[in-house]
Image (cartoon, grey):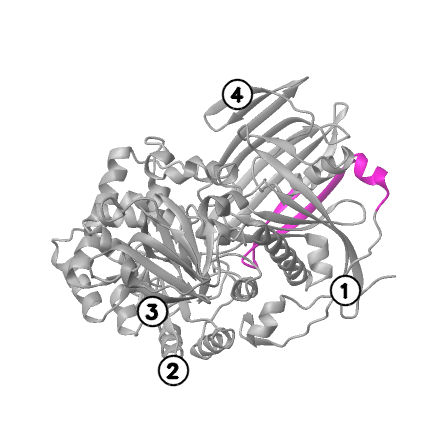
Amino acid sequence: MVEAGPVISGSAVRTGRWTVLATAACAAVLGVAALLPGAGRPAASAAAQASPDSGAIRVHLLGHAIGSERYVIHPNDGALALTDSFDLVDRGGRVQLASTLRFTPAFEPLHLRSVGRTYRFVNVDADVVVRGKQARVRNLEDSVTIDVPRDFFAIAGYAPLELQALLVRYWEAHGRPGRITTAPGDPTTSVTIEALGDARIRFPRRDAVALRRFSIDGVAWGREILYLDGGSRLAAIVTRANLLPLEGVREDLAEAYPAMLDSIVADAARTELAAAARTSASVPRMAERDFALVAARIIDGTARPPIEDGAVLVRAGRIAAVGPRQTLKLSAGVRVIDARGKTIIPGLWDMHAHVALPEWGPAYLGVGVTTVRDMGGEMRWLVAFRDALGAGRVLGPRLLLAGLVDGGGPEAFGTIWADTPEQGRGVVDAYHNAGFQQMKLYTLIKPDVAGAIIRRAHDVGMTVTGHVPRAMTLESMVDSGTDNVAHLPVRGDTSSPAVKEQIRMLAAKRIVVDPTVSWTELLGHTRQPSLTSFQPGFAEAPWPLRASYGSVRNPADSAAADRAMRAQLAVIKAMHDAGVRIVAGTDYGLPGFSLLRELELYVDAGLSPLDAIRAATAVPAEVMGLRSESGTIAIGKRADLVVLDADPLVDIHNLRKGRWVVVGGVMLDMVNLRRAVHFGG
């Protein structure tokens, strides 16, 4: 007997060429398709032996079709060979990957060759040759010979997408092993696959599509959801391109079922959040409700001197008292936690993030980030994740949302576009109804549309941030009434009159800037020095993250990269000295750890450690209108705290010595959080 899952319907607002869900409730349920368990499983022999095949996969980034993957599987000298071309155009930049895999009819790899890119800066040049019980593995400039373990597959990142389907078919053909070692990789690299059951995806006035669902954990960082049809061919996949949402749907299915993409994304999101809830439940809670941290040094996030031998009392998720330990009277039954020798600071904020998978939650908490402003992603996913966080179903920071809107066209980012003032106002209303705090302008927005968005946002109590659009200047964007500007909008010699005037304007108009220089540094790094020399977090990062950022190939030499960074840090110091409010943000980078690097760079620029910390605590709380709720350690505020083993005012690098984090009154061990999402092995 087949039981129907929940069927949720919702209206959509349509204006011009963009579509967004009209209500937060509709957004939270993620989709219009009903998925029913119980679709028939193909015979085992269909999965156990490979056969010739060909097809095309339509690829989407944030729901926007940006290219395709075409593949052919053909006989090759007693074996089979996959020939695959992956070709995307992301915001005007070409991304191409050419891959071949020779493999046995039982999907055992013989020779993988993959060259090109899987994202704008992620380079791939992998060669894996298996001869008997050994494999020669080359990844970029590194090569090694390894003994081939019993369960082994060759794959070099999330693309080719078809290669992931072959990986799952290998898993089925070989008895569904618990882990599969993959190459390229390192000794800790392995992939876990889980069968998630069958689904029958139903569409109005169309035949249902029967699919099998699988999760793949370890090819990319975070869980991917793969769908195979009744013949074990790839039907769809939901994955990430360097942490941005990327979806592939087989072209014939996409054409036959226009709602296929939305349905698959909806199902994958529910699946991911359910898995995240299980992961969250496995992380021990050290304390919650009523407890006190005592005997610590407390940096409360204000300009006041630290409290020595201090104590913080937490009750029901709020700070009930803070001050010198001897002045606090603790009632019976309150758990007392000795924090002697430790330093307590407010929970940190990342004011420029793109949160595309639930693994970000524990990763952020694992370095002390307790509030995040997302700066543009898939609306339905973000609303669902925010609501799951707010309800306590999954672990992670509080999530504030800035709604991404771009101008239309093939180079647009995402699927929410506005090309007229009327469309712009409609987008604002849709985001406002879904509970977003801000609007984010992107590159292709026209000046009159930007003005309409800004005015409408202010009318409904939202603020505006974003890139400086191509058709505008920093001055015209400020004149249009924006509240924030993303990235570092001022470049050049700080002694020049033009740069001085821009900084004076930003200060006079009280424009907030999130410089994201840690992201600039990461993309601008050269082979020397190593990633870990400036970002020690990479030493414990999962292989897919290390491989992606380790593949960056910047043509500049290290001296030129250093000069460029010094020039940007000089601008940050000049802005700070002029009174421009600076908030710390990372864009992408290494989840959580990049925020710590951002603050280290502010100190390198000449800010004091306290000013750097305030750029990630008190200042963002004020900017987001949450000054009375968060940002400092004070009575009545949310209990968002970080407990460090050393004092960051002595050395800002001591922010990396985190021991415990308190988020909404729940105290957690930071190492446990990171390990839950595969940091540290």
Kind of residue at badge 3:
Ile
Q: From what the image shows, is residue 248 above or below residue 428?
A: above
**Depth check: 128 or 546 in front?**
546
Residue at 25% x, 37% y is: 560
Badge 4 element: strand
Q: Does any portion of residue 405 appear in the rendered image?
A: no
Kind of residue at badge 1:
Arg
Kind of residue at badge 2:
Asp
Could you tell me how many numbered marks the image carries? 4
Measure the alpha-carbon separation of dots 2 and 4: 61 Å
Mark 3 or mark 2, earlier in chain? 2
Give the percent coordinates (x, y) of residue 520: 33, 47
**Depth check: 303 or 54 in front?**
303
Extent of the magenta region: 42-70
Measure the alpha-carbon separation of dots 3 and 2: 32 Å
Q: Name the residue beneath numbered marker 2.
A: 459
Where residue 445 sits, quadrant-wise, is bottom left
Badge 3 element: loop
Q: Name the residue beneath numbered marker 3.
A: 635
Mark 4 or mark 1, earlier in chain? 4
Q: Name the residue beneath numbered marker 1.
A: 202
